[in-house]
Image: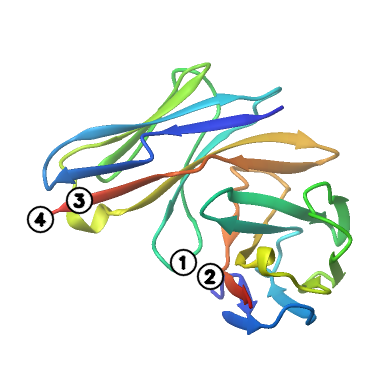
Amino acid sequence: EDQVTQSPEALRLQEGESSSLNCSYTVSGLRGLFWYRQDPGKGPEFLFTLYSAGEEKEKERLKATLTKKESFLHITAPKPEDSATYLCAVRRRIQGAQKLVFGQGTRLTINP
Amino acid sequence: DAGVIQSPRHEVTEMGQEVTLRCKPISGHNSLFWYRQTMMRGLELLIYFNNNVPIDDSGMPEDRFSAKMPNASFSTLKIQPSEPRDSAVYFCASSFSGGGDRELFFGEGSRLTVL
């Protein structure tokens, strides 16, 4: 059974304090690991897709990395506007269509 | 460009009533997904359609839940009869399964409260 575990559940940082969020996964036939950002009262917003171990992608203060068992979302010198819940999801192909399984998310708060 | 459009944004109803949630996917997308989000269980996939055909409904909790996609631009999720444990935020998402990253684009969600 596909499993996605994110840690920590919640993280509070001071503005400028860098850190990393973890996503551990178990999936048969991984066809992509996704990171999403979700603001309160909104739907998840796509950030990155990673396909193979060793791959890295960056966007502003965020960098996502992937190994065979986990992914990290590194946040460098965060700002208060980076506060959100960050969701990780894995995808595998079923009957010609994609299926995403999400983790519980990490709720990130950046204090000014 | 219009994103995924869901209605209603908020619904408060009494136990036993029928609830219908609506979704308009992004034009040109051929896959549509219904998710439910709660604090306890996070985001759970209920059902997804590919080219208007239901592919996997194994996430639908029970027979009280049903979903339809009569055409490429409209889908409904119906709960009848509703129960308090159905209270959650229901998200619709769409994607294009023809290639590329094929990320999901989510709507703003429909927050359902069953009293």
Badge 1 is on which residue? A42
Residue bearing mark 4? A112
A12 relative position to B106: left or right: left
Name which quarter of the figure residue B13 lies in.
bottom right
Res. A65 visible in picture: yes
Nearer the observer, disc 3 or disc 2? 3
Graded by Cα atoms within 10 Å as few (under 14), some (14 to 19) or many (20 or more), the crowding at tag 3 reads: some
Residue at left 77%, top 49%?
Answer: B59
- Out of B62 and B97, give the one closest to the viewer: B62
Q: Mark 1 falls on what kind of element?
A: loop
Mark 1 → mark 2, Cα distance in angstroms = 5 Å
- Specify whether disc 2 shares its chain with disc 4: no
| Residue behind mark 2 | B108
Which residue type does callout 1 highlight? Lys
- Distance from the alpha carbon under mark 3 to that under mark 4: 7 Å
Of A31 and A111, which appears nearest the observer?
Answer: A111
Is disc 1 in contact with disc 2, using a CB cutoff of under 8 Å?
Answer: yes
Image quadrant holding the C terminus of chain A, namely bottom left
Residues indicated by labels 3 and 1 sit on the same polypeptide chain: yes
Q: CA distance from mark 3 to mark 2?
A: 24 Å
Q: Amino acid at mark 2?
A: Glu
Locate residue B58, reporting x and y percent: 83, 46
- Helix, strand or loop at label 2? It is loop
In the visual, does A3 lie left or right of A48? right
